[in-house]
Image (cartoon, rainbow, N blue to C red):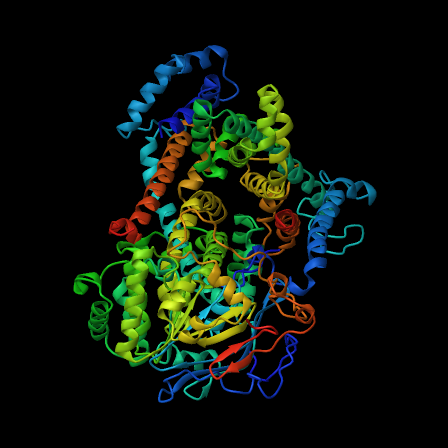
Amino acid sequence: MALPVTDNLAQTEPAEATLPFWARSHFRMRRSALALYIPLGALILLVVACFFGPWILHLPPASFANIANSNLPLGSPGHLLGTDQLGNDMLSRTLVGGRVSMVVGFGATLVGFVIGTSIGVVAGYFGGAVETVLMRILDMVLAFPSLILAMTLVVFLGPSERNEIIAISFFAIPNYARLSRAATLKIREREYVLVGRVIGAGPRHIMIRHVFSNVLPSLLTIVPLTVAVAMIIEATLSFLGLGVRPPTPSWGNMIAQGQATMSIAPQDIIIPAVGLFLTVLFLNLTAEQWRLRISQ
Amino acid sequence: MLGVSLIVFSLLSLLPGSAALAILGPGATNAQVAHLSQQLGLNQPFVERYLIWVGHAITGNLGTSLLTNQPVIAEIEQRLPVSFEIMVISYILSLGTAIPVAILAARRPRGIADSINRLFSTVALSVPGFVTALLLILVFSVKLGLLPTEGFVPLAHGLVPNVKSLILPSASVSVGLFANYSRILRSDMIDQLRNEDYVLTARAKGIGQWRILFLHVAKNSLFPLITVVGTNFGYLIGGVVVVENVFGLPGMGQLMQYSILNRDYTVVQGEVILIAVAVILMNLVTDLAYIFLDPRVRYGATGN
Amino acid sequence: MHPATGDDVHSSGTAAPAAVSVATADAPALPGTEGHEALIEVRDLKVTIPFRGQDVYAVRGVTFDVHRDSTVVLVGESGSGKSVTARSMLGLLPPATTISGSVKFEGHELVGLSEKQWRQHRATGISIVFQDPTRSLNPTMRIGHQIGEGIRRHFGVSRAAALDRATELLDMVGIGSPKERVRDYPHQLSGGMRQRVMMAIAISCDPKVLIADEPTTALDVTTEAQIMELLLSLQSQLHMGLLLITHNMGLAFTYGDEIAVMYAGRIVESAPKEELVRHVRMPYTNGLLGSLPAVDDLPHSQLAAMQGRPPDAMTTPRGCAFQPRCPIAEARCTEQAPPLAVLDGTHACACWYPL
């Protein structure tokens, strides 16, 4: 490690500016590992719970329950989290609802990632008019508020899970395109790419082998963040009635339903909200820690 | 600008038949649909329709609502002040809290103010706008009964009731903005305090921490602040749409939502274009603000 | 900052023989300064800075005086601890720094002062000019305000009065049309002018001691001479003590009254200029001088640069820190670190085998 220049005595605060306050410097080494694995582990736990929980725990179905059971409080026998106004078991509904949010969130990110990165790498590698045109179009999409964009796309596609994925991916595409293009520009001039060109490899081969694989790691750290934002947009769309429609539960539309009985049964809103919050929080923390580890 | 309108228009016109179908309802026969389509000029070639539409738009005619048959402009005009007021109050709230908190946090990093701010911001950014809104309603309206749950009171009926009806929605939007603003500001201020030599010079003059923060550092932090305000403008708009729904406020967001649900394409088109214009204007404003605030640009350099 | 506690845990292992120990004895007296009071007395100053979890021993026991109306030059390579020494005299080091030893200004102990107490001494007692005037001036503040800020803070005068004084100061530092210039922003001035502004700021509160930390390193050679002349002129006008920090031996010999050579956080040789010119004792100093281009060198002849690099500031060598690079090192040099010993009256050197 280089000698610290005595003229710059500022104790630089590396990305610690974004760390949660409970991370202290004397646990530096151990902290790096734990701080990443805890949120990551919690995240995996949540995903497993949503996809396999109802099956493992033999929970009652999430829809079309006996309306006589409506609005049971927390801790009722057979219904750990009570029931909603239609009598559906809250725990079951929450877990099943989580599936939608996660699938859409991850799906939109995947689509956005694949398409966006491809566009970005192509633009960055070839440059010239291709790059300019592509980037201009993307800039226009990027400047536009993502929620409104998703909403308008849902207009003519119609509300559904699959269409949500398409609509939300539109906001992810330009983001990844920008990032991958910037990374491509940096890598384009590096030696191994030049070597590839010298030995006569075609542009497609070079792009896939060298550029793509080196651009990938830094982009991957953004993925959890994108999933988090995508999930929030999905929840908002469902909340506004433009996404997944009842009786299929989604955290968003569950919260919308819960609005009606807010004063007497706030848990109808709080429980799915907590589910969403935890998932997003862990995604954010994972992304932060991952980025820190990669940069060291 | 032109590009955006082109994209929007092309997207919305890809299904010409369904517009007529939506108006007539599912029971219409094919002949009726065809007839209405012709009437609405939906059968003309794409380019022609687009040019006509652009021509109208420039002169302020954004078409007629498919639902209410009112001119789109009129509907938008009616609802614009509400949304605008929400945005203004949101800015006041978010900037008014973010700047002092960032200063406090920068003055003593890892101290109380800083830790609370960081924790709060992490949480705030993990919660969608409508959840914040509902939580605020739960606390302030349901439990404490201080503020109305929904409904808008126009200025004409008095300033206080007007603000009361808008404060919760604006606060919901401000939470997310506050988190972003305070993070950027705090980190920029700390960066200045640690790394910039002019801060060292000021300390060498015997100037106290507070004065340094307010007079030296704050001014230079305006630039990243303006940048982040600009980039968060889209978030603000989205947030306004959401809170208008939750609080039942008759603004542009509510109009947008209903138009989408009812497939009122012309209204949606008109609103989207307006939003695009607003975004572009905002970018322009931030660029101008830069130019205005940077003394290097105002007074050209005469030395090296 | 810890109060002066004498030797701290991070002692460099220097055994200081009591008789000629500089830790207790006064610094070598300058010729002809008997009448001049010592404004600053530094005794065995040690500064340790934590950096990313490790300790950097930036200064390992430094002793010297700064007298009124005379110039002390601290010369050394980058990383020798000269800047840290300078900043420790103003309390401008990071809060986690450990300082031991004593730094007295007009008899007052400065080590261990609270931030509030430091502010009393800054600008009015001791002042500093930094290396890079472009970065040291706030780009969004007019220079008049930056100059007047210290005046207002310490003397409580009105804004108008401070501005007037700032104009006067601009004139003193040789900036033309000061009345118009005082409203300028830093970017409107050239590099040399900015450094003049820095000097105006430094002398704005009539300090007794002025520290100049590499004042001309960021400037071109022609401006360098002007700035140095200005510095000297200001010194004599205000009767200040001047502490000049530089890595440039040429500057040191031209402008210094007493020269102290620093290496790896310690002073390894110190003497009045004339004495040093006559007889260099420390091999390191010799090496530094040898690497200067001479006027009568043939064109394109190689500069005799010294081999190797200064030691890592995070390690504590057992013997002499310069030993790995020293052309005349012997076995003793690896085992024991030589103390800074006074050789004859005014000349001190830290070497087992002085030249």
Q: Nearer the viewer, residue A71 or C189?
A: C189
Q: Nearer the viewer, residue C77 or B8?
A: C77
Q: How many marks?
A: 0
Q: Position of residue B102 (x, y in %)?
A: 46, 62
- Please tell me whether residue C226 is drawn above or below residue A89 in the rendered image: below
Q: Quadrant of residue C159?
A: bottom left
Q: Position of residue C77 (x, y in %)?
A: 50, 62
Taking the spot 50% from the left edge, 55% from the top edge, the residue there is: C304
Observer able to see residue A249:
no
Quarter holding the N terminus of chain B is top left
Q: Quadrant of residue B59?
A: top left
Taking the spot 41% from the left edge, 33% from the top edge, the residue there is: B272
Taking the spot 55% from the left edge, 29% from the top edge, the residue there is: A121
- Please tell me whether residue A69 is drawn above or below residue C82 in the rendered image: above
Q: Quadrant of residue C9?
A: bottom right
Q: Nearer the viewer, residue A76 or A100?
A: A100
Q: Position of residue C15 (x, y in %)?
A: 65, 80
Judged left or right of residue B80, residue C270 is right
Which residue occupies the extreme top position in the image?
A: B31
Q: Position of residue C193 (x, y in %)?
A: 27, 60
Observer able to see residue C133:
yes
Judged left or right of residue A26, residue C213 is left
- Please tell me whether residue B117 is drawn above or below residue A258 in the rendered image: below
Q: Nearer the viewer, residue A125 or A256?
A: A125
- Please tell me whether residue B97 is drawn above or below residue A126 in the rendered image: below
